[in-house]
Amino acid sequence: MPTTLSAEPLRATFRIPKRKKHVPAVRARVRETLAAWGLERLVPDVELVSSELVTNAVVHCRVSFAEVEVTLHVDWGELVLEVSDPDRARLPQLGQYCPEGDEEGGRGLLLVAALSESWGCRELKFGKCVWARFRADRDTAEDST
């Protein structure tokens, strides 16, 4: 049987129920995954961005009993974080504040924009995906020589 090489050898996907109490589990999973891939230097930024994007999905998704899917993968020297939920109608926009009157709301995407190389969103057939990209140079002693 022939063996094919994957264009994306580093990929992790997991899902959580659409509940705020599961956001810390996402941060832990992101830390573990990046450490296993030798990308520890990205942990602080990717952990915070994943927390913001997952929290947005949990708070704003209007589909009952939904799950939020988180995917991390390396693509052309960049780490890509994707957070998907089934509410296709509500695409995030930078600078929109939380309509629930929370004075702290609406600033998460500003953090995402500041900490990532780029970010955006796309509609899926049955939902949406919000993504952020980070430079993915591995943390090795050889990189510093």
Image: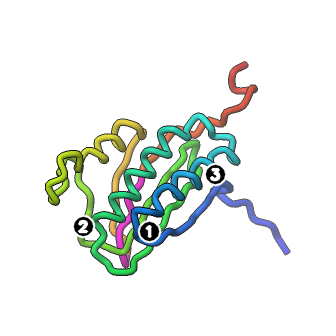
As shown in the figure, which amino acid type bears the numbered disc 3?
Answer: Thr
**Mark before the other along the chain sequence, 3 or 2:** 3
Residue 99 image position (x, y, % from top left):
15, 58
Task: Determine which of the numbered discs, if any, sits on residue 68 in the image.
Answer: 1
As shown in the figure, which amino acid type bears the numbered disc 2?
Answer: Arg
Note whether 59 is above or below 126 in the view shown: above
- Where is the N terminus found, in terms of image quarters? bottom right
Callout 3: SS? helix
Tell me the magenta residue range: 125-131
Note whether 11 is above or below 90 in the view shown: above
As shown in the figure, which amino acid type bears the numbered disc 1?
Answer: Val
Marks 1/3: CA–CA distance = 18 Å
Residue 76 image position (x, y, % from top left):
57, 46
How are the residues colored? Answer: rainbow
Q: Badge 2: how crowded within 10 Å, few (<14), some, or many (20+)?
A: some
Q: What residue sits 23% from the left and 50% below the top?
A: 105
Q: Nearer the viewer, mark 1 or mark 2?
A: 1
Q: What residue sits 46% from the left and 72% below the top?
A: 17
The residue carrying mark 3 is 33
